[in-house]
Amino acid sequence: MTETADLAPSLGKLRPAAGFASDYGETPAHGVVARPRPVRVAVIGEFNSGKTTLVNALLGAAVLPTSFTTHTAYPTVVRFAAKPSLRAEIAERRRVPIDWHELDGAPAQHIYRLHVGMPLDPLRTLRAIDTRGLGLGDESVDTRTLRSCRTADVVIWCTPAMQAWKDSEQQAWLALPKAVRRRGILAVTFMDQLRSPSDAGRLLARLSADAAPLFRRMVTASAHAVDPALQAALTGDRDAAWG
Amino acid sequence: MGYEAPGLGEMSPVEPQSRSVEAIGAPLEVARTVLLNLTTRLGGLLGEHAGPLLDVAQRQLQERSCRIAVIGQIKAGKSTFINALARRPGLLPTDINPWTVVVTALHFRAAPTPPEHAGVFHLFSVDEWRELAEGGGRLRELTERLVPGFQSDLLRAQLEVMRKRAERRLGPKFPELLGQCHRYQTVSPQILTDYVSAGDEDAWPGKRRHFSDITRSADLYFNDSPFAFPITLIDTPGTNDPFLVRDEITRRSLENPDIYVFVVSALQPLSAGDIAMLRLLNGLHKDRIVVFINRADQLPNLAGDAAEVKAAIERRLRAEFPSLNIPVVCGSAWLGNLRLQAEAGGLPPVVAPGGVIAREPAAPVHCPREAAPRSGGGATAGRHAAGEPSRAVPAVHISSGLTEVSAAITRLMCTSGIAMLLRQIALCLAELVRTADVTDRAELQSILELIEARRRESETLARRVTDEERSLAAFEDHAKALETSFEEVEAHFKEVIATATQLLRSQLATMVREFASREADYLQQALQEKPRRPNWRCDVMPLREDMEQAYLGIVDRAAKEIDRVEEFLYPQLRMIVSSLLPAYHGGLLEGPAWPEGATPSVAPLGDKVTVDLAVSWWRRWFASRRICKERANHLRCLIEDDFLKIADELVQEAETHLTERVDYIMGRVRAVSSGLQTGVERRTANLAREKVLLEGAGDPQAAERFETEQQQRADACRERQAAYAGVLAELQSVLEGLDGAQGESRTG
């Protein structure tokens, strides 16, 4: 598949959102190299569109559990930490340690989101926010999810190659403010599920015409293996990768 | 057969050929064939009076097919599914992009001769095209009402694209093509692609003309059917298509079908959009839906996921529609097609409608999974490739699900309108035969009595003749009275219908107005609390449900009243029968004529209304009007306009339904009464000759000849009676068969 574009360079070209300009820092006065705040990448899309898989691919490791039958139950923030950690955010922004298997079963009402810390290199430059899938039927959840990506620097919309870009996706995306959409990347996921290479070309031709104009750029991603090109970009020379 | 389709993930050497499994609609086809034969036989056996009813029955039996609509979101695999179900891999064009843009009906009917045309394509009329391409169809109409003067950039751009594309593909003079109908003797995949596929932007090979933008409908005819019963499969463009115009085309095709196969992708099953569509269908058609979870072969962990996805969907459906039992089948139409190709021995030629081989085999199917078997699940291990060409069969053996879907469809057919129609025809034929039986018995009795009387002495004969005359005169009186009561009953029926429609109209209108003003109040409240982003969403589903309930309730009450009056007719008819044949105790005109459970159409309730528009449109609406009161008023008008129109349509549907019912009842009683009348006329003629002989009484030879003639007529009566008994026994077994099939499908 020749079309597989890698995501990392395009992330690098994006500056944090306007509201966080101070975070990013003004040009340092004394030649001190300012360490930029990690770019916040929110991954959104309908359920089973490969959001969690994409986050794992971005990080080059299976950090988050993926499944076709149980959906991501809590928004999950993955950031750099010296030691792996998993904490649940509950009322009053308190974070309590928790274990993955405690999260099995029905979603707990009192957990707002999960915080995952991992000693992974890519996390030095990006913070990934995995979200709950849209279109499962609860409108209030969808509204909250869509609102949560307003503070992200980059918003990646995942659309699965086998059933790409439906009207419900287009409607949800267009309902976001323009400022958010300008930071948007369309990721066509599960490219490895296509049944022939020519399918990929034809699909991307259609999406380039119909969907890509609504985003800053369009990339492709594969689900079941971490794309070598993507991995290389993430683990390679940071300056080269992030411009 | 005792064969059970293997569960997903289980290993099965080869899916058995579907021919060893019962073909779709087999139980009903048995009934249909018997009934069709009987209509022909009865044409000769019964008198002229039965002609019209027999003709109608015969036409229905010949022409009515079971309509199965295949619906679902874009790229769920609807066309692929149809190809597999019809056992014709590669028939309908499929693609990675939303490809089907035209509602395509595939008519399957086993017949010795090929149909006159294999493919018929209707292009839009000038008006339809103008409405769609320039007006934007119903969606534009709705959005225009919501936010006047605002035309979505998206919709406008899409319409522009559509017009330009039609021009580029068909030339600047394409409007001249509008209104045409194109017919083909044979249909090749290329022709189908030309008419029903979206086609790639600017990449159209050669000089072929591509009509799909301006094609309204496509009909394909096959005389070589893989199904037992005549079946019409309807392929629809997917819903949830970002190309908004197509979504409207699909909704329009939802009204007629007997059965729906709702195809969802195993990868994103039952999204909010799917549930909304099922709600709509449930409102429209109750329990005639099969859910097919397609693309199971693409699940990452075959063994576990498929079963889990199926269970999750069943749970969800039970929660959403507790009163329904929607069958759910998990499988892969893609796999079904591959297996069909393998069965045929390699890659088969594509068979065109009418059985004509239209082109060379398709290119080998690319099968990426075989090169790189999945990690998860033990299902990848076994490869029972005995006799199967390995290139076409994936390493993982799972059920295509097609056998199960076929069985589910057959079960639904046994409780559908088709089964009801067959039962109605059987009952109607039985009624006609019993009437003829009564007539013949009476005639036979009268002949025998006359012969008997003549043998004794002329005095007895004279008395017999007078008796017979009196009995026939009594019949005439009854018949006259009956004719009067027919008229009275008909007038009463009309009154019942008029009252019901009037009541329905006023109830529905009140319902709509009350709902609209209540919603307007809620909106006003919400706006007062949060003027900028009110916490408000209008759900018109309860209104739809209330309207449906009122509609069905009133129609049902009217139907009961019609049944009651109908019952009143029967004693009169039975009285006539007993005056003709005092000893007759057969069951004639026992139950109501109309099949139980035949409900009127609720299709108008499925119309998309302004309030159904997506959130983004409403955001624009909130942006456009400032004054809170004005907004509430506007909302009220929107709801009233949309739903009062629907109410009108429902009233019309009710009227049509009840009128049909009444017409059918009257048709049946009239046929019975004129059947009796014919018999009486024969007897009167016979009697007249007897009287001539009695009065002349001279020529002994004439009397002898007459007696022989009478004997022959008596024999003919006896023969006919034997034939009637045979027909009734056959009809009885048809009815029992239909009952059995229905019972099985309910418990199964």
Image (spheres, coloured by chain):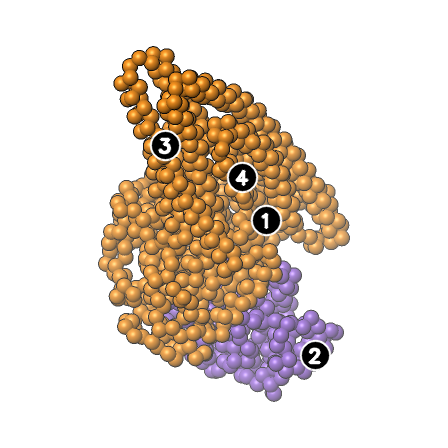
Chain colours: A purple, B orange
Residue B424 at what x, y percent from top left? 47, 41
Element marked by disc 3:
helix
Left or right, A27 with respect to B420, comes to: right
Looking at the rendered image, the disc whose residue lies closer to the viewer, 4 or 2, is: 4
Please report whichever mark, 4 or 3, sits nearer to the chain's N-terminal start.
Answer: 4
Residue hosting label 2: A95
Instruction: Give the chain letter at badge 2.
Output: A
Mark 4 and mark 1 residues within 8 Å of each other at the beta carbon: no
Please report whichever mark, 3 or 1, sits nearer to the chain's N-terminal start.
Answer: 1
Residue hosting label 4: B591
Instruction: Give the chain letter at badge 4.
Output: B
Please report whichever mark, 4 or 1, sits nearer to the chain's N-terminal start.
Answer: 4
Residue hosting label 1: B612
Q: CA distance from mark 3 to mark 2?
A: 96 Å
* Residue B364 visible in the shown view: yes
Residue hosting label 3: B717
Residue B210 at what x, y percent from top left? 33, 48
At horizontal 35% and vertical 56% (from top left) the residue drawn is: B86
